[in-house]
Image: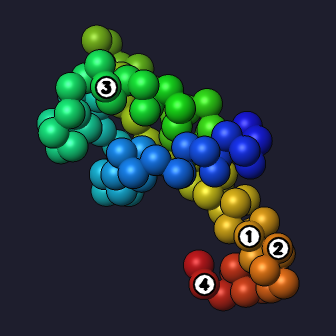
Amino acid sequence: MSYREILSALGDEQRRQVLMELKRGRLSAGELASALGTSPQALSYHLSKLKKAGLIYETREKNFIYYELDITVIDEVLLWLTELKGGTHEAIKADT
């Protein structure tokens, strides 16, 4: 995981929509595709980019793959951006 991969993944509207859907909780690829109105094939590309960036992770249960947000990576990015802006670690802690 690198900041470049993370920021690249976040730069795409479709991937941001995937993250917003996953904010609600764990979803299967089919549930995500249905919620976003896209094909499973198109969604697969975006899920791959998000996984590579470390923003989501998958768990397998029988014939299904479920996806969830990885909040730790998002926290790291927020911390980095706050430091870049000139803020402090305490500013992040106060907001969470």
The vertical placement of 24 against 94, above or below, is above
Q: Which residue is the extreme one toward the top? A: 63
Q: Mark 4 near mark 3, Cβ–Cβ under 8 Å?
A: no
Q: Decide which of 49, 66 is in the foreground and name it.
A: 49
Q: Pointer 2: residues within 10 angstroms few (<14), some, or many (20+)? A: few
Q: Quadrant of residue 54?
A: top right
Q: Position of residue 83 (x, y in %)?
A: 83, 75
Q: Mark 4 near mark 1, Cβ–Cβ under 8 Å?
A: no
Is residue 88 visible in the rendered image? The answer is: no
The vertical placement of 42 against 18, above or below, is above
Which mark is on residue 42?
3
Residue visible at 57% across and 55% down? 71
Is residue 83 visible in the rendered image? The answer is: yes
Residue underneath mark 1: 81
The N terminus is located in which quarter? top right
Q: Left of 57 or right of it: where is 35?
A: left
Q: Pointer 4: residues within 10 angstroms few (<14), some, or many (20+)? A: few
Q: CA distance from mark 4 to mark 2?
A: 17 Å
The vertical placement of 59 against 35, above or below, is above
The C terminus is located in which quarter? bottom right
Q: Position of residue 36 (x, y in %)?
A: 21, 43
Q: Quadrant of residue 44?
A: top left
Q: CA distance from mark 1 to mark 2?
A: 5 Å
Q: Position of residue 2 (x, y in %)?
A: 76, 41
